[in-house]
Image (tube, helix red, strand yellow):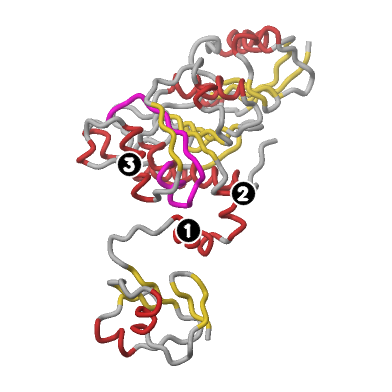
Amino acid sequence: MKIKLNEKEIDVVSDINVLDLKKKYKPEADLIIYNGAVLSQVQVKKIKPNPGDSVVLIKKGEIPSRRELESLMVARHTPGVHEKVKKAIVGIAGVGGLGSHVAIALARIGIGKLVIADFDIIEPSNLNRQAFNVDQIGEVKVKALKENIKKVNPYVEVETHQIRLTEKNVPRVFKEVDILVEAFDVLKEKVMLVNSFGKKYPEKPIVMASGLAGYAPSNWIKTRRIANSVYVVGDMETAAGIGCGLMAPRVGIAAYHQANLVLRLILGEEKVK
Amino acid sequence: MSQITVKVPVNLKRKIGKDNVSIDAENVKDALEKLESKFSEKFSEGFYIFFLNGCILDKKKLNQIKLSSGDTLHIFLPVGGG
């Protein structure tokens, strides 16, 4: 009969129990998850899977190989989706509240390569919204983010630039990317990035953000196309300022809008005009 | 002179209560100057992004970009935060 073992469909004899599965396929496993539930020592000897059941064998602390992780991605996302995602190169300008979360989201789905750029270091006040940890305070953001990405998916290629982006260096830093995410905080830099990248690479999509501060309704945040190759995520109005600071929930909503749009562009569900 | 549609930025939209205005102009710089005069907003200063018919414009060459009737000029003013 067919069951799923670690997300792969395999053929097994009909009266096999999960303990025998473990002995045969992954004797070093510490944990057995059967149809989503962790089994006790008693249960592993008793339970015999039915056709179509799912068994997951885990050795705690073991990092899956590239091949294993890839097969998990393929199983989750379908082969066609994964083929496109793993070939994509995405640039992220600014790795603060938006950029750090966009990077992690794309790493989770197995993006091929990220080019991340930011000049800054991690400060305590960043932790209310940025994908860094307390023990990373004082570290260079792009280096710390690369470490965090590697803990989520060690097989994503990450190119880092600890640099203040300018009109002159933007085209060089992001020359290889298929899509550029604008994730700056400062208005002047947002405009500079769109103008300089858009001028050099008018056919490449830019996913920018505008209006994501505070705790206004989540549903005000939308993804809009405003030009042939420029999209904007946000409510278009709520600027960060005194009394209306950036906070994790709303910044996160915008960041995941950006990440989903990047995915849709990669898959051809959205197309540049 | 060409009659074009201008998609206005959020600050001007709040002022006039409309998303779009029509204007006659020869080139993009001319269009912006007329808008500035009409609505007392300075588009030559500030952090705007300009698009003509969906294409990003080079801010240093706005006087060289000629307009045709039916064109759409979009003046986009993003807000800070990220």
Total numbered labels: 3
Element class at badge 3: helix
Residue behind mark 1: A67
Image depth: mark 1 or mark 3 in front: 1
Image depth: mark 2 or mark 1 in front: 1
The foreground one among A89 and B34 is A89
User: Mark 2 is on which residue type?
Assistant: Leu
User: Mark 3 is on which residue type?
Assistant: Glu
Name the spot of residue A173 as percent of width and height, x first: 49, 25
Whether discs 1 and 3 lie on one chain: the answer is yes
Q: State which region is magenta.
A: A103-121
Q: Distance between the residues labelled 3 and 2?
A: 27 Å
The quadrant the N terminus of chain B occupies is top right
Density class for disc 1 (Cα within 10 Å; few <14, some 14-19, many ≥20) is few
Locate residue A223 relative to residue A161 in the image: left or right. right
Per the rendering, the mark at residue A267 is 2
